Image (tube, rainbow, N blue to C red):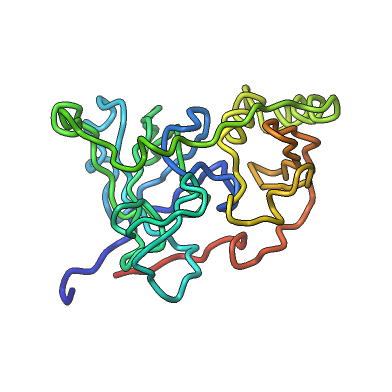
Amino acid sequence: MPGSPLRVIGALRSCFREKFGTPRQPLLVPGATASLTIAKEFLPEHSLAGLDRFSHVWLISYFHLNTNKTVRPKIHPPRLKGESVGLFASRSPHRPSPIGLSLARLVAIKGATIHLAGIDLVDGTPILDIKPYIPEWDIAAGATAGWVNDAPFPSLNVGFSPSAVNDIKTAEKRLNVNGLGNLLTDIMSQDLRNPRDKAQNKDGLELGFFLYDFECRFAVRKDTATVVKLLTGTVMHKKERRATPSTVKLA
């Protein structure tokens, strides 16, 4: 719209390094953390005043890693296992305007930086706006969930090899974080695999995703995902998905 440019207020720094491994919806992984530093031009010392009294915030984001060149009117949500629904009956990131809406828990505000949890966004995601979550207005009485009620998220049991247990302890010390095992459990219990990708769903196939500064290698056998090991120093090989994003200018 002429005269109405969108502006990026800051880039999210998230524990998720790529799309694979990032939760498909917000708050599914409570321990998934991120921070957002508001650009100086928006005077965070004034524009953030009062936000710390809210427990949750809406994040309006730009899906900067989308690679689709066309927008399809029907899509295949992973939880429908191959069935399709209309684009606007879904939360697919592949939309005419690639805008995302995420609900996150507000942990703390320190200076110009907002610390968040329950994130479903990849590192570097441009944030267009923040709005406080207000239960009085944002909870709709009698709301229905459409096809989502008929297609619950697939759930996997999660286990750890002895090597992975040691790797987690080492990573927690290196990163100065706690609860890494619980974080990995919450991430992988949702089943990261694309149900339409037969090769990816081969029983026992070792897969990996990048989190913090390591690659988590895991394998799924029947209904159990097992963390095999955590690797540091490996290279993200899918550049179009995993490269550090450049600054997105929408204005």
Image vertical order of residue 95 relative to residue 193, above or below: below
Q: Residue at left 69%, top 53%?
A: 200
Residue 63 placement, left or right of 197: left
Give the percent coordinates (x, y) of residue 224.
70, 31
- For residue 63, what is the image quadrant? bottom left
- For residue 128, what is the image quadrant? bottom left
For the view shown, which residue lies furthest in the right direction? 163
Nearer to me, 197 or 17:
197
Residue 63 placement, left or right of 169: left
Residue 205 placement, left or right of 16: right
Location of the C terminus by quadrant is bottom left
Give the percent coordinates (x, y) of residue 112.
36, 41
Nearer to me, 151 or 172:
151
Q: Residue at left 36%, top 30%?
A: 106
Image vertical order of residue 137 relative to residue 18, above or below: above
Location of the N terminus by quadrant is bottom left
Give the percent coordinates (x, y) of residue 214.
72, 43
